[in-house]
Image (tube, rainbow, N blue to C red):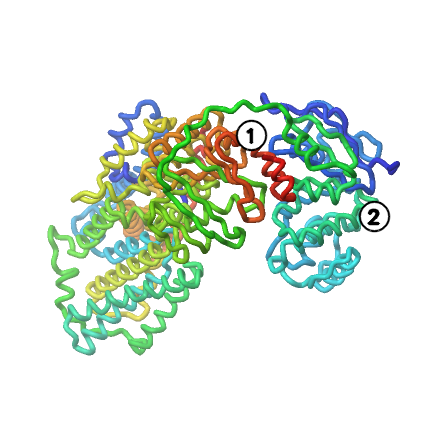
Amino acid sequence: MTTDTPAPAELTAAASAPRRTADAAGTAHVRWGTTAERLALPVGLLLLVAVFSILRPQSFATTDNAAAILGSQAVLVVLSLALIIPLRCGDFDLSVGGTLTLSTMLVAVLNGMHGWPLWAAIAAALLAGALVGAINGFFVIVFGINSFIVTLGLGTFLLGVVSWLSDNRIVAGIDPKLLDLVVLTRPLGVPIEFYYALGLCLFLWFVFERTLLGRRWLYVGAQREVARLSGIRVSATRWGALVWSGTIAAAAGVLYAGTTGSADPRGGVAFLLPAFAAAFLGGTCVQPGQFNPLGTVIAAYFLIVGITGLQMMGADPFVQDLFYGGALVIAVSLSQLLRGRRPQELG
Amino acid sequence: MAAEVAVAVAGLTKRFGTTQALSDVGLTLRAGEVHGLLGHNGSGKSTLIKVLAGYERPDAGTVRVRGEEVPTPVPASVLRDQAIRFVHQTLGLVERLSVAENLWLDDVARGSRRNVSFGAQCRDARATLADFGLSVDVRLPVAGLSAVEKANLAIVRAVCRRPDDDHEVPTLLVLDEPTAFLPEEDKRALYGLVEKVAARGSAVLFVSHFLEEVLTLCDRVTVLRDGQVTVAEQPTEGMTHEVLVEAIVGTAPGGAPPRPDACAAEVAADVEGLSTDVLDDVSLSIRAGEIVGVTGLIGSGCDDVLGALFGVAPATGLVRVGGVPVDLRRHAPLRAMRAGIALVPADRNRHGVFRALSITDNLAVTTLRRHRGPAGLSRRGLRGAADTAVRRYAVRPAEPGRPVQQLSGGNAQKVLMAKWLGVAPRLLLLEEPTQGVDVGARRQIEDLVRAAARDGAAVLLSSGDPDQLAALCHRVLVFSGGRVTRSLDDAEVTKKNITRACLLATSTGSDEKEAS
């Protein structure tokens, strides 16, 4: 993604944006546009919540429902966060759905069937995720194949591996301790997995903005050749980003195992498209035009609130597909529009 | 030579802003002749060709084709009906398509060729190429051809008869520096084809920088300088290099502009036997504080030296920076950077700056490590460094948060310079540092180069602009055929000497001596 935005270093939080607008009086109209863009999605989220609360005060505007919305989709949020790392670097990772499923299945098979201790099963699942990322990177970097193709292929390959591991059946018997660690503990009434996702978001925000590694991702994604000629090891950086996304996708898989207590060989696939929708929609806010963790989390909840609200209004289940699919296309169109509208050259 | 006049222009005048690109230029091209057109960069050559091609409308003057005046800008219908054809330096071939498909590309696109079956295309292509005495496998992709085969294919494509052509042969074929990228030994094959085209009755306008080939290949020659004709349609027989050089360069003595004082510091960088696919055993050494120019004609290798030193393309040889050897076999930009080398690349937008990122981010890429703190990278530090740099290098607008693509070319170039000057390199490599930059910014950038040298950097500057080289350099190395063929020192570094040396670099040794 090459996009034109103000410096990410200066836009670390949406909240600080209005104050800065006031500072730069000379170019107020320029800043206004970007401020409005930055805040459009968060404001949209609030509006959505308000509308559904008014329309369905009995069911939507309840603490139970809020807890359910926040907690139930932590897996999706973590998976979306996994995606934005290679996306920031300019690469796709379509294998995250497969990696998530593999990780869930490994926890179930190793812990539930073979009786490994829980920590060992989780560690094995995370390692497997890192390995998937390394394999993706190997083909993308060493053979120079488009990441879209490599990860699409490997993702499908992984689903085959999962079917073989599980004999294509749902595997149960995961240590109930994992349920405690993921959903049953509820600080402030919200399942703890929500806090894991939030913690990961803040951690990634720190990595993106405050570390050399995160800045290299930005540079490589902005213009690969310029990055190379600026002394950045582009290949290693891209390879590393795919290992990160594999590992985090595996972590999402562990959470998924803890949410359901079992592993469905086809369970993770449905997450792929919503995760992409959240990542791209997230790229239109907070730092418009750049994939960013905070925007991604806001976008994920925007999608979830929309779907939950519509279902409570009596919409059919297929509204979910309409919403996710539509959001992805609209998000990509929006970011394209934002880009095209800005002046290309002043001088 | 009483042959029919194919194309004639008279009184052509064209002004761009304050630049008089053409003033009262006349040129008559006869059927069956190869006519050479010479002139240095900015002489008006390109403008003349653009007028012929209908890209530019002259302010005054007439264009006649086969005796009939045509409107200006020359309409596409005239170019098509009268078969006036152009082959540009870049050839315009589609590398992945086969020879046959390239040959009939325009016809298929226009719909004037009905039979688009691959077999039929190949059959026709073989016949056409054979007609011009060429034999290549027409099914092969163009990417697999040698440089001269590609050039010949482009020429045949331009001149071969089309189904909707009124004339047997094209009225005029314009070849714009077709040999610039060809190895010396391959050029003959192209000359043969050009002579064949002329012998069939077309006029050929042969644009070139190489005096030798113009003298041997062309029947007559015209030279432009500063938009004026200095040699008008003279027969090449009996003409010497010296006459042409005088006509191209002019005799006006150029007063030496202010240059940095010569320095006697220690050697900062040493290059021995640098070779790439273009360069052939290049050796040079630069002292700290010295500005050394690198120049030559297109294809001479002068554009490849700097990239090779920065590890952009594979190279062999021995390079020492500050006495420390740099391993070229495992060379890469990161290693070059660590050795104290910096490269400001010629293609600013594709290789130099992150267009979508802010000035702050662009400046930070080379200096991130300095801003590491206990809580990660310091935003304040990055912002402060950018503020300082923006002020110091006079970037306008002075807003570090602006994306670089919103800056003018000159200001973007200042950001690019600042990005590398920030690391205080021992060896600063500059490729065409004022390309696409306005006059004011050009001054400022030249001052930055002088300041960098004063601060102790060894500067290697590649430029095709003799004025700039004369204004900045202590020493100028002239390249030809991948080697340094001439070195101009101190007082010898003048615009005229540089231009002469470039033009004469490909000629014989005696000419080179004369030039000094």
Q: Which residue is mark 1?
A: B495
Image vertical order of residue B246 relative to residue B348, above or below: above
Which three-letter amino acid code belongs to the residue tagged 1? Lys
Q: Position of residue B483 (x, y in %)?
A: 54, 48
User: Quadrant where the C terminus of chain B lies?
Assistant: top right
Residue situated furthest right in the rendering: B2
Q: Nearer the viewer, residue B45 or A345?
A: B45
> Disc number at residue B90?
none
Picture quarter with the N terminus of chain B: top right
Q: Looking at this view, is A201 or B249 the one in front?
A: B249
Given the image, on which type of amino acid does mark 2 rest?
A: Arg
Q: Is residue A111 visible?
A: yes
Earlier sequence position, callout 1 versus callout 2: 2
Label 1's element?
Answer: helix
Asked which quadrant contains residue B46, the reply is top right
The chain letter under disc 1 is: B
Q: Residue at x 34, y 27 (%)?
A: B398
Q: What residue appears at the point 23 percent right and 36 percent down from the top-left corner?
A: B381
Q: Is residue A238 above or below residue B241?
A: below
Q: Pointer 1: residues within 10 angstroms few (<14), some, or many (20+)?
A: many
Give the CA distance from mark 1 to mark 2. Answer: 42 Å
